Amino acid sequence: MKLHELEKNARKEIEETATSEELEKVRIRYLGRKGKLTEILHSIGNLSKEEKPVVGRVANRLKIELDQLILIRKKNLEESRTLGLEDLSLPGRKPTIGNLHPLTILSEEIINIFISMGFSVVEGPEIETDYYNFTALNTPPEHPARDLHDTFYLKDGRLLRTHTSPVQIRIMEKHSPPLRIISPGRCYRVDTFDPSHSPTFMQIEGLWVDKDVSMADLFGTLKIFARKTFGGDTKVEFLPGYFPFTEPSAELWIQCPFCTGKGCSVCHQGNIEILGCGMVHPNVLKNMGYSEFLGFAFGMGVERIAMIKYNINDIRLFYQNDLQFLKQFNESKL
Amino acid sequence: MKVNYNWLSLWVDINLSPDDLANLLNHLGIEVENIELTSNDAIFTLDITPNRPDLLSIQGISREIAAKTDKNLKKVINYQIPEGARQDKEIELSVTIESVGDCARYVASLIDGIEIGPSPSFISERLEKCGIRSINNVIDITNYVLLEIGQPLHAFDYDRIGNKIIVRRAKNGETIVTLEEEEKVLSNLDLVIADNRKPIAIAGVIGGESSGITEKTKTIVLESAFFKPELIRKTSRRLKLSTESSYRFERKADIGILRTASLYALHLLLKYAKGKSVCSIIDTNTNPELTREVPFSFEKTNRLLGKRVEKEEVNAIFNKLGFRSNGDDTNPKIEIPSYRRDIEIEEDLTEEIGRFIGYDNIPSRFGYSNEHPIIKEERDILPIKRIMTSLGFSEAMNIPFIEPSWVKREGENPIELKNPMWSDKNILRVTLLPGLISNVKRNLNRGEESVALFEVGKVFTREREEEEMVAGILAGNMPINWYESQRPADFYNIKGTIEVLLKELNIGGYQFSECKDPFYITERALSLNLDKSTIGCFGLLCQDICKADIFGFEFNLHKLLSSPKEKIQYLRTYRFPPIKRDLSIVVDEKTPYDRVKNIINSIITHDVKIELIDVYKDPKIGNNKKSLTIRLELYHPAKTLTEEEIKKDMENVIKGLSKLGADLRK
């Protein structure tokens, strides 16, 4: 009789709970260590021989039933928490997606532009010898142009490449022209780590060697690159430059996108240098073993282009990996 | 280098605004970094490329402006030897070049009656506009000549040195106190100017304190020399001493201008430093090679530029630059003046033509053809990166210099930097984890709740050189939302990431085994093995690395990508829905789920999908026990199986599992 009443009350109370917290309280009230049903189960031992099996069976069955009821109610409560809310402005259940690094996104974009122009992508080691990094590229020891590349040396006498040009030499040792390659990769130069300098950076270099390839081809190729990267109406200009491994040498400048050519703190009188390029120096062609060919080469820092393109004012952001920064870049947005 | 508009105007008629002049210079490859406008002048900061030492003077810049604007220079520096001066007499002064290859020419002049005092204002003002501090008339005049025509000069106090000037290599360990009052220890790799007793200057770099000009100086020896560029560069770099002189000498000064520079300085000293008479002028090489011939080919130039240039046009450009064309018409030899040391080969001449016709006038062309072979290099990094981002990880890039304390693995030796950027981070990374761990700290400190990052990059060891790795890191809570309660990231998050990564890369047949990598806590980490070789580990990173729980992984990218891929083969799909059975068993908590799963797999005779849907521990099911609920989905290609048909399988499963000590829960 007592059990019957207990069952009735418990069922009612479970039914009336509105939250999981309330439900938990009801569960403790009946099934907890000192719960009403628990106490009955504990006291079965004191009952008479006749009562014992009957009450025992009923109480045990009731416990299982209540357990199940509470479980079902719990599920219902959890579902109803959101069911019927019908606030369609609640944010959806979103899987978390990460972002590619902006330098990866931009590198891929640039690489694909050159792939579409028939270039192959090649890579090489980051630890280099003096020969491949400098001497083979017409920059023998004590050449003043070495000042342009302040170099990290290793204790074993080798160095961290200061540009990806050594890859070009290595490829030319294995393959013969005609050849159209780009070599992306990490490079190193001794530099302070401040808003405009970093001891490491990503570079993409290109090389086109053939029987007859000229500055006109160089300018045409790089204009396509610049317009695809910065937009079709970008003003592009080539100015004379100097690199020991090219002759004649040039620099590609675009109109500063920040001030649109009026002149600002970012640019030089309204223009920004994007990359260096030129006709491969005859000494380099000789070192590659292809004196009878002509070629052009170019090289650009990906950070620099990213900073111009995405309006980033501090190069260190690329290497500090703040999620607040990284989460701003996704491929379709750029 | 700084030059000012007004001084340039003395040399060439400019007729351009400062902005237009800057534009003209930029188009000549003389990069104008900055223009500073003053009330009546404009000061340009120029970035002169290392191949053009001739541009490191007012005269040099003026030459380019004149050539580009079709004008003649208004000024010619050409002073005669003052009356009464003796030439090449070794009475008061002698010059001996012991180290002949190091000094191709040395011009020394002796002038007396000097009175040290301030410079006339036109000299001190021009110096200061060009960024050189005015000191006294003698020093200023040497600097003035340097700035105006590019030849470094040095003045010694005759009374403080002997009457012998010796150009020689320093003895090892020999010392000199410089004008900056610093003692420098020299070696026989350094060239010095010495008197009888000791060095009085580091040649081409800086003078010695003991021989320098003082307020009492009356007689000076003026040095105008040409030193071997490589030597000056080495000394300047080794002593970390870069001066206006060394900067020009190491880029190769103009051997032809030494005498002109001396005579110009003497003229100024007589006029503005009360110099009385020039006693003698010594020149060790009165007949230096002043010009050089470089072959030129119209055909090669046309090929290089991709444009046909006309002979008249080319000759006009050469003329303006002071180059003289000799020999035949198609392949002439071009005579180059001594100040254009950068013109060595015909390609250099091609660049001059390009510069002066203007790169704007070279056409743009893109001839696309497919005859170029595609060089196939494996480049499968992007798919991995994309999988990682789809799993919630953002890509990081770190500077690969780390502290040696990160070298923890046995038999792994780091590659050390000779000139590290930061003295404590003096090795190349042997693992990507340190960078990622520091990124986690930084992000948690900035209030991020949840950090998931990955990086693809190279690690370096002496044993294995360069290896490309992929590593990831997960820390903090899982992202918070309104439909799930928040919980911290755990081992199974990183394990799930790895499992999906492997699946998406189509890599099968891998095993997980005990992780012995010192970066991980053995009990909470596993290693990934493919083809019996370990390609990396994943799990909980050691607590001493960071306060928060950080889960990480790092795999050798090459081994990962070169592992045999499972061939993609279409497998039949099932038209009929499966019969589903949930199996709840209680096993010893130490029994791995893998064993349970393998047993079920080996027993079931139908096609089956096995999914673990619940795991828990509860004293109610016994201490040291755990409950597993496993969902079996049994398929048949031609029908939905019936209870009857799977009965046998299910009985066998329960029998099989009971051998594991598993109890079936109902």
Image (tube, grey):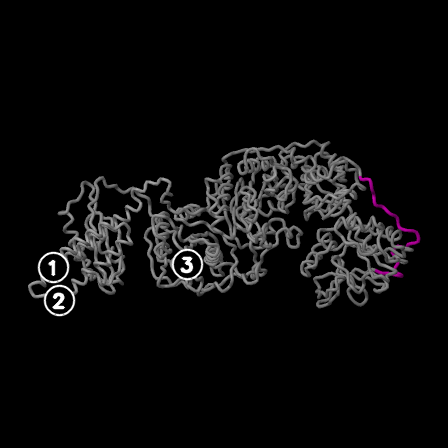
Q: Residues within 10 Å of mark 2 (few under 14, many from 20)?
A: few
Q: Which range of residues does the magenta coloring cover?
A: B73-94
Q: Are marks 1 and 2 on the same chain?
A: yes
Q: Is residue B272 left or right of residue B250?
A: right
Q: Is residue B452 magenta?
A: no
Does dot 2 land on a helix, a strand or a loop? Answer: helix
- Residue A243 percent location from the top left of the image: 63, 46
Do callouts 3 and 1 mark residues in contact (Cβ within 8 Å)?
Answer: no
Task: Please state which amino acid type lies under the numbered disc 3.
Answer: Ile
Q: Residues within 10 Å of mark 1 (few under 14, many from 20)?
A: few
Does dot 3 land on a helix, a strand or a loop? Answer: strand
Task: Please state which amino acid type lies under the numbered disc 2.
Answer: Gly
Q: Can the viewer see residue B133 in this picture?
A: yes
- Residue A84 percent location from the top left of the image: 29, 42
Q: Label 1: which residue?
A: A57
Q: Label 3: which residue?
A: B550
Q: Can the viewer see residue A281 in this picture?
A: no
Q: Chain of mark 3?
A: B
Q: Chain of mark 1?
A: A
- Residue B398 percent location from the top left of the image: 50, 54
- Name the N-terminal-most of marks 1 and 2: 2
